[in-house]
Amino acid sequence: MNGVAFYVLAAIIVAGAAATVLVPRSLQAGAALAATIVVVGLLCIVAGGVAVGIAEILIPAAAGAALWVAVRGRGYERLLGADAPAPAWWFAAGGAAALSAVAIVVVIASGGAWQSGTGSTSLLTAVHDWAPYALVIAAAGAVAAVAASVVLGRTSADEREVDRAAAEHREREEMARRRREDREAARRRRTPAGEGTR
Amino acid sequence: MNAGPGQFAVLSTIVFGIGLFGVLSRRTTAGLLMALFLLTLAPVIALVGFAHFGATGPIPPVGDAFALIAVLAAVAETVLGASLALLGWRRLRSVAAVLDGEAD
């Protein structure tokens, strides 16, 4: 593979991944993750895995669009709020860096024993001959997960009723508070200064 | 200058490390799910790289097949996690409840 293209795409992927875990606002982090996914898909396509690259972009895009509609439509904005770093972020950074360092050292140390070449058989043949059951199980799992998500994420009639009652209760509380404040303000206006301290 | 399986493996490792850091350090449900998605994205890079540059001769791209499976699994996990978070939010009416398991 062309080294320049690889390193450019790799730099964007690493930057996007870092932004995903470091940006405090969840919406911005989501945008960074989306960009990372697209660039990983492009890397797959450039490397020769066209079908995987397209799937890598389209499947998460469809799932992300469905999630976006669900989150925006039900008032879940607070779930996407700012994400303060955990108190033990330095422990997380140390652990992740140590594990990455070990893996990279192993990769570099064992790289000489690898063989290089290219494959020429189509993905469809590979899936059909080598991994049919795994693919079917994964696809069935994805469909089951989407179905379970719809079941879990839907709003039932009793929840809508509870939501409406809670909203009415909040509105009544707010109106009572305003009336109280108005009465208090009117009493202060009527009472001359100093009279109330007899 | 060419890129081979070693470069793909190193890139995969770096992305995995960043995802691991995110899983350990993020506190919101959305942040945790995104970091988990990064964790599952890392093997896809390695699988595709090894499938196309890691073997001699015309072999079936099994790595591609498993990368496809990994993408499906990652999306399923993320969608299910997000719906569970929404369910927790709806039932408990609290961000803290979703994050810490405590109702406020």
Image (cartoon, grey):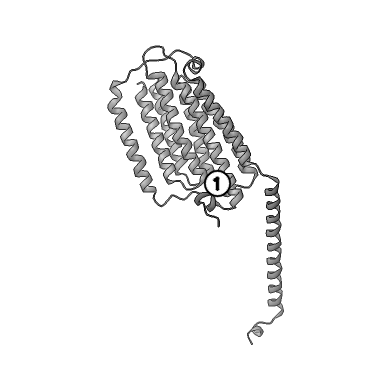
- x, y percentage for residue B43? 42, 29
The residue lying at 41 percent from left, 39 percent from top is B20
The residue lying at 37 percent from left, 44 percent from top is A93
Residue A12 seen from this side: no
- x, y percentage for residue A115? 33, 18
Q: Quadrant of residue A136?
A: top right
Name the amino acid type tagged 1.
Leu
Residue carrying label 1? A80
- x, y percentage for residue B98? 54, 49
Badge 1 marks a residue whose secondary structure is: helix
Q: Is residue B8 left or right of residue A197?
A: left
- x, y percentage for residue B73? 51, 31
Identify which residue, B15 or B92, lies in the foreground.
B92
Residue A158 seen from this side: yes
The residue lying at 59 percent from left, 38 percent from top is A67
Chain for numbered disc 1: A
The residue lying at 34 percent from left, 44 percent from top is A94
Quadrant housing the C terminus of chain B: bottom right
Q: Is residue A52 above or below residue B14?
A: above
Quadrant housing the N terminus of chain B: top left
How many other residues sit within 10 Å of disc 1, few (<14), some (14-19) or many (≥20)?
A: some
Q: Is residue A16 above or below residue B1?
A: below
Number of labelled discs? 1
Residue at the limit of the structure toward the bottom, as seen here: A198
